[in-house]
Every structure is written in C-alpha cells, then in structure tokens.
Image (cartoon, rainbow, N blue to C red):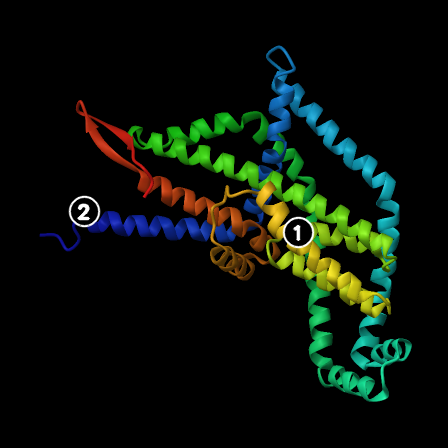
C-alpha cells in the first residue's frame, strides 16, 4: 500500500495549483488590473457597438461599429473637456497650490480662530476647538500627508489608462471567440456549466459597468451644478472629483462629501450646513431612487456582503481593490450558484449536464 493514494495526490496537486494561481495573480496584479479595466471599458461600449453593427453591412461591420463608437465617445469627451476642462484645471491647480498653506493653518489652529471670529463664535468656543486641533496636530498632519501621498501615487500610476482603450478594442472585436476558446479548454461534460457561468458573468459585468458610469456621471453633474449655484469655492474641481469617487462603493461618496466640506471649511465658506444637508439628501436619493432603478438587483448581494467586500478589497488592493470588490463578489456568487444548480447525469451512456432549480 502506497503512502499516498491517487485521491490524496489529486487533492495535493489541486491545492498546489490553487496556490500557484494566487501567487501569479499577486505578482502580476498590475498587468491584470489593466486588462480588467480594459474588459470593463469593452463592456461599457458593447451595447452601442452591437447596435451600430446592425446598421452596417458586410464582413467588416464589427470593425466599423467599433470605430464609430470610439469616435462618438471620445469626440463627446473632447467637446465636454473643451467646454469646462480649462475651468476645472485652473481651480484644481489653485486648490493644489493652497493645500499646504491650508493644512498648516488648520493644524496650527489659526484657521479655527479666523473662521470663529468671522462667524461670531465666542472666545471660549474658539479656544476649545483650537485646543482640540492642537492636541491632535500630529494626527491631522499625518492624515493629510498620507492622503496627499496616496492621491499622488494613484495619479502617477494612472498612465495605464492610455492602454485601456487600446486593449478594449481587441476584447470588443474578438471577445466572443475568446469566450468560445475558453469553453473548449474544459471537458465536454463541463462545457455546459462553463457556458452558463460566462453568459451570466457577461450580463452582470455589462450591467454593472454601465450602471456605475451612469450613476457617476449623474452624481458629478448634480453635485457640480449645486456647488456652482451655491458659489462654493473650487466648485468645478470638487464636483467632478465627487462624481468620480462614486465609482468606489460606499467609501467613495463619503470621501467625496468629506472633501467638499473640508475644503469649504478651510476656505471659510459660510453655508456649509446647507451643503451638508444637500449631500445627505443626494445620498438618500442615490441609494433609494437612482441605485434601485439603474443598478437594479442584478448583483443580488447583501449590503453586509458588499461592506465586507469593500473593506477586504481596500486592504488587498487599495482604491482599485475597493472598486473591483463588488464585481468579484458577484462573480463568486454566480459561480457558486451555477455550480449548485447543475449536476452531471448519465443519459444513454454519455455524460450531460442537467439543469436543476437553484437552491
């Protein structure tokens, strides 16, 4: 009798392969993230490309549809940037130049005295708040420095955004063939379940990406318009930032709202209470009106699972990990649900896949 039987060897080999796959994912995470965002971008344009392809005739209809979609999307972005881009750049530069000064005034307590004097706070109240800031000066300065350093790292590493649209062309052109080739890698009896999983993943990812872009664009437009109407300092810079942070589930909107309030306080803006009430109201509208209508229940994830995924994704992959945590968890649920819904049965001596009702 051998020390290890065949079944034990298979289990050990499976565990080893799983560990090697995790190690490969960790070591190649930067490249995989680029390809992942290329897939997201391809899903964003998949529906317009499919619509345009039906309008073209001939064997090169797919290529023509992709080119047309790219021209429309990037042409619209260019027009939008030409209209409001210069104002955003000017305000962003002005804000970045004043951040060190505002940080120093905040940490020293000088800003609290200026704001308190202008708003009629009593001397006792000013001294209490100022002593609070001075007592936590190290923490405040450390937090601001870490936030700025992380933002600088994210901006520095965003060069890969230039590669994403290029890679997305290949996924748009040959995505169906790549999926069919992936199915052929599995045994004949497993191809049915793999096909179903890929189909559900495709539907989920496409819906998720389009919904996130829609919600972010809507949030950026509404918040920017409100800030401009209320004459909040750096409105054209803060609004798009808050909209972009909408991509990051749960954490992003909180960071965006806190940034708007912090900059408004540092700039000695007088109507912060109204801005705070608006941000709370808009968050409620997003969570209870926009999200259910636009995102729907396609992900089928419990809020507690979403929170766990966001926190775990942030620990493992930072900002990128937080963003991809939701589709990753939805993918795992689809795989688990589909695996439980299928079982192999023998029909006429051949193995087929029978579909059962999901448990």
Cβ atoms at labels 1 and 2 below 8 Å apart: no
Rendered location of residue 134, percent (x, y)? 76, 84
Which residue: 88% across, 59% down? 94
Residue sticking out furthest to the top: 58
Query: Percent x, y for residue 174?
Result: 54, 26
Q: How far apart are marks 1 and 2 (CA)?
A: 58 Å
Give the numbered dot on residue 285. 1
Could you say where residue 59 lies in the image, as x and y percent from the top left? 59, 12
344 sits to left or right of 159: left
Per the image, the residue denoted by label 2 is: 6
Find residue 54 and report its image quarter.
top right
Instruction: Decide if residue 311 is on the left or right side of residue 87.
Output: left
| Up-down relation of residue 258 to residue 104 (above or below) | above
| Up-down relation of residue 188 to residue 85 (above or below) | above
Residue 243 shows in this picture: yes
Using the image as rendered, state which of residue 63 and residue 227 is in the foreground: 227
How packed mark 1 is, by other alpha carbons closer than 10 Å (few <14, some 14-19, many 20 or more), is few
Q: Is mark 1 on a helix, strand or loop?
A: helix
Looking at the image, tell me whether mark 1 or mark 2 is earlier in sequence order: 2
**232 in relation to 349, above or below:** below
Residue 142 position in % (x across, y down): 70, 74
Q: Extreme right residue here? A: 118
Which of pointers 1 and 2 indicates the residue nearer the eye? Answer: 1
Helix or strand or loop: what does disc 2 sit on? helix
Quadrant of residue 339 within the rendered picture: top left
């Amino acid at each position: 009798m051998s020390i290890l039987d065949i079944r034990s060897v298979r289990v050990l080999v499976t565990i080893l392969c799983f560990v090697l796959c995790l190690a490969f994912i960790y070591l190649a995470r930067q490249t995989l993230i680029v390809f992942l965002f290329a897939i997201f971008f391809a899903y964003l344009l998949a529906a317009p490309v499919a619509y345009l392809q039906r309008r073209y005739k001939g064997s090169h209809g797919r290529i023509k549809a992709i080119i047309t979609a790219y021209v429309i999307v990037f042409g619209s972005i260019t027009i939008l940037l030409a209209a409001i881009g210069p104002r955003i750049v000017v305000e962003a530069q002005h804000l970045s130049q004043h951040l060190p000064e505002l940080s120093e005034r905040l940490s020293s307590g000088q800003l609290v005295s200026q704001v308190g004097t202008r708003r009629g706070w009593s001397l006792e109240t000013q001294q209490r708040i100022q002593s609070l800031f001075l007592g936590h000066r190290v923490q405040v300065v450390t937090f601001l420095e870490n936030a700025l350093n992380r933002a600088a790292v994210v901006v520095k590493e965003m060069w890969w955004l230039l590669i994403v649209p290029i890679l997305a062309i290949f996924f748009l052109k040959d995505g169906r063939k790549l999926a069919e080739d992936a199915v052929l890698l599995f045994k004949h009896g497993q191809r049915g379940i793999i096909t179903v999983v890929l189909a559900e993943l495709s539907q989920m990812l496409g819906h998720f990406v389009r919904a996130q872009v829609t919600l972010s664009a809507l949030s950026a437009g509404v918040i920017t318009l409100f800030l401009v109407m209320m004459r909040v300092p750096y409105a054209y810079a803060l609004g798009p930032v808050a909209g972009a942070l909408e991509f990051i589930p749960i954490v992003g909107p909180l960071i965006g709202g806190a940034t708007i309030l912090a900059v408004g306080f540092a700039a000695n803006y007088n109507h912060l209470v109204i801005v705070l009430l608006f941000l709370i109201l808009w968050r409620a509208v997003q969570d209870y009106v926009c999200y259910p209508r636009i995102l729907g229940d396609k992900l089928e994830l419990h809020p507690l699972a979403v929170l766990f995924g966001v926190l775990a994704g942030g620990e493992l992959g930072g900002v990128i990990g937080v963003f991809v945590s939701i589709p990753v968890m939805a993918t795992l649920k689809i795989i688990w649900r589909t695996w439980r819904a299928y079982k192999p049965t023998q029909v006429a001596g051949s193995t087929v896949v029978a579909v059962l009702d999901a448990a």
